[in-house]
């Protein structure tokens, strides 16, 4: 099975977000970056499918030059090669632009299966995978918690809301968006890191035709709910104040 | 005209549809409500209570069970026939499954997970969370109408939807959906049998997130839960890591709870978690990040290291 995994580089969860001077995006020149977590599960699922059914795993990312870091990491975890659609403008691009960039890069490769994470930790559109499926003319299924290869194509377990699930079948080629927690992640071994240095990262220029469907006017910190009472002081003082509130005001513990 | 796409499964209306109706009514008037399915007259009747120009039912055997392909086909035809300025959806898992494909098919903008709408002249500006809710973004939809918009679950009040003086007219759209064009073949939805714990009955819940750092630290959380007479629960990453069983998970993919007391330890407050617990009567948040979104909905907040604060609370409880 020839599998593409679309991955994104996002700022680390630990990085204290700062907004840039014209409030259009974050100050990402100061940030540290990592692999978008749902995409890590998509990569892991691809590697497991390859181990079971043989084939090839190709990681693809649309982003600025720094995104090669997550492609290299994916190669170290076991992906065979990488495609990097490189442009600074992709750092905060909308879902249509990112999907078009990925579509142009993967269309001629004739993948059997394309995997993405269900959404990114930065923009959180939850759109790129499904838009990509439409652009590639593939059937898709989203928020997937199990993947079985069958003679006719795929049988996948979709997560619904509130603890419900549903199996569905679909023919190949197909695109799936993968839910976090579908598998247990592996991490790169030293051997994998060494091997990754010899693997190919093919660089592609983005398609010029894509037009953005939405524009960020400004970004800002949400206003705090006014009713929140912040309890300060040492841990002991804060704990004492909290229990006073919970016992005597809210009356939720005895 | 704004078209609101309501959601039903097995003849039962998803309550989030009313939230999308509220959002659309705030954005402009008039609205029409679309419903897809097969033999869904009673759901259409329920929706007709809304202050809407009409309820349009796309009734086709091929829509009896939800599929992305079926919904894209049905809605693309309906949107072409009705030519709305905007199409609103609740941001459910089902909408997330088909709306991006519909937007790509129509080549129209889709703005997802919208929490508020601002009017600037004739144009609408949408507020949506980015960076897991740590920041908000004001965004505009670009290109020709209709613009597609999904409303975040819980961001608009279902009970604030304006009702009509009399029931809205219900009309069946003359749209057929070709079953042979549907590539996904769904099986019946099911629940995992092992869901043994019903957290919705708990009076107090102590929930833990990424801030706990390692499974070995869960003992500390268990001690606090015991001292408070609380059930233990978690955000999704903790269950994904296998540190607590899946049936302890709170949020959109887990259980929805509204206890008297909810203590969130090291939980940043991504929306997927908040939707499962924000109905709790008293919410306590303890987190080292003062910007964590969980503080926006907490009644009491402590910014600090949970490994220092939690032992202090346990010690205070034993006094």
Image: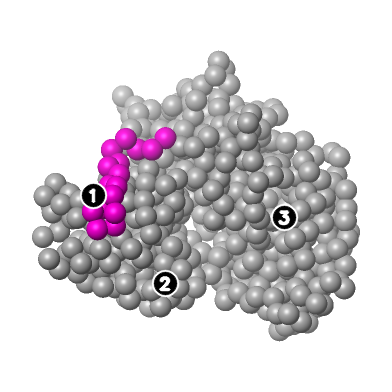
- Disc 3 target residue: A133
Q: Chain of mark 1?
A: B
Of all residues shown, which one is farthest toward the bottom? Answer: A52
How crowded pointer 1 is (Cα within 10 Å; few <14, some 14-19, many 20+) is rated as some
Looking at the image, how many numbered discs can be counted on the residues? 3
Residue B248: quadrant of the picture: bottom left
**Residue linked to disc 1:** B281
Instruction: Name the residue at 38% across, 74% down.
Output: B217
Label 2 in the same subunit as label 1: yes
Q: Is residue B85 positioned above or below B313 on the image?
A: above
Residues A211 and B136: in front is B136
Q: Residues within 10 Å of mark 3 (few under 14, many from 20)?
A: many
Which residue is at a point 46% across and 33% down the rendered structure image? B116
Which chain hosts label 2? B
Query: Nearer the observer, disc 2 or disc 1?
Result: 1
The residue segment tinted magenta is A223-238
Answer left or right for B212 relative to A47. left
Image spot of residue A147 (x, y percent): 62, 73
Residue at image coords 86%, 40%? A208
Q: Measuring from the top left, give residue A134's x and y in whole percent.
A: 73, 51
> To which residue does mark 2 refer?
B246
Q: Is residue A146 above or below residue A22?
A: below
**Residue occupying the point 20% across, 51% down:** A241
């Amino acid at each position: 099975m020839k599998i593409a995994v679309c991955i994104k580089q996002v700022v680390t969860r630990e990085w204290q977000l700062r907004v840039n001077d014209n409030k259009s995006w974050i100050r990402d020149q100061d940030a540290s970056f990592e692999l978008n977590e749902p995409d890590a599960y998509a990569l892991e699922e691809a590697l497991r499918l390859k181990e079971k059914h043989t084939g090839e795993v190709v990681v693809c990312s649309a982003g600025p030059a720094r995104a090669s870091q997550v492609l290299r990491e994916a190669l170290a975890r076991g992906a065979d090669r990488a495609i990097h659609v490189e442009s600074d403008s992709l750092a905060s691009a909308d879902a249509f632009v990112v999907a078009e960039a990925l579509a142009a890069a993967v269309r001629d490769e004739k993948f059997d299966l394309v995997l993405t994470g269900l959404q990114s930790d930065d923009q959180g559109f939850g759109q790129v995978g499904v838009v990509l499926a439409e652009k590639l003319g593939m059937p898709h299924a989203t928020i997937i918690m199990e993947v079985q290869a069958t003679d006719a194509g795929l049988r996948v377990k979709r997560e619904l809301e509130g603890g419900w699930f549903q199996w569905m079948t679909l023919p190949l080629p197909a695109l799936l968006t993968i839910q976090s927690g579908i598998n247990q992640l592996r991490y790169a071994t030293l051997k994998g890191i060494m091997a990754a240095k010899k693997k190919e990262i093919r660089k592609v220029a983005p398609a010029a035709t894509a037009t953005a469907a939405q524009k960020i006017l400004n970004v800002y910190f949400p206003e705090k709910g006014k009713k929140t009472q912040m309890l300060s002081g040492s841990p002991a003082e804060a704990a004492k104040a909290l229990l006073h509130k919970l016992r005597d005001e809210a009356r939720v513990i005895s | 005209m704004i078209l609101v796409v309501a959601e039903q499964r097995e003849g039962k209306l998803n309550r989030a549809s009313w939230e999308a109706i509220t959002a659309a009514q705030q954005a402009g008037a008039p609205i029409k409500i679309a419903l897809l399915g097969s033999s869904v007259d009673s759901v259409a009747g329920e929706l007709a209570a809304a202050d809407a120009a009409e309820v349009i039912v796309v009734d086709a055997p091929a829509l009896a069970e939800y599929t992305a392909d079926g919904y894209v086909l049905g809605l693309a035809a309906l949107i072409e026939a009705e030519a709305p300025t905007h199409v609103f959806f609740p941001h459910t898992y089902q909408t997330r499954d088909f709306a991006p494909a519909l937007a790509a098919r129509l080549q129209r903008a889709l703005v997802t997970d919208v929490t508020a709408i601002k009017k600037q002249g004739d144009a609408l500006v949408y507020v949506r969370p980015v960076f897991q809710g740590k920041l908000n973004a004001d965004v505009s939809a670009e290109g020709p109408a209709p613009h597609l918009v999904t409303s975040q679950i819980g961001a608009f009040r279902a009970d604030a939807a304006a009702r009509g003086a009399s029931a809205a007219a219900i009309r069946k759209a003359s749209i057929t959906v070709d079953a042979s064009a549907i590539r996904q073949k769904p099986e019946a939805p099911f629940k995992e049998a092992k869901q043994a714990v019903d957290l919705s009955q708990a009076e107090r819940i102590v929930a833990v997130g990424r801030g706990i750092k390692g499974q070995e630290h869960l003992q500390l959380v268990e001690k606090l839960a015991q001292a408070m007479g609380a059930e233990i629960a978690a955000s999704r990453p903790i269950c994904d890591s296998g540190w607590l069983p899946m049936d302890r998970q709170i949020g959109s993919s887990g259980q929805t709870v509204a206890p008297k007391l909810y203590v969130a330890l090291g939980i940043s407050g991504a929306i997927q978690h908040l939707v499962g617990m924000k109905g709790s009567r008293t919410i306590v948040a303890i987190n080292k990040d003062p910007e964590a979104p969980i503080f926006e909905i907490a009644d009491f907040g402590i910014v600090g290291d949970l490994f220092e604060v939690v032992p202090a609370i346990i010690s205070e409880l034993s006094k």
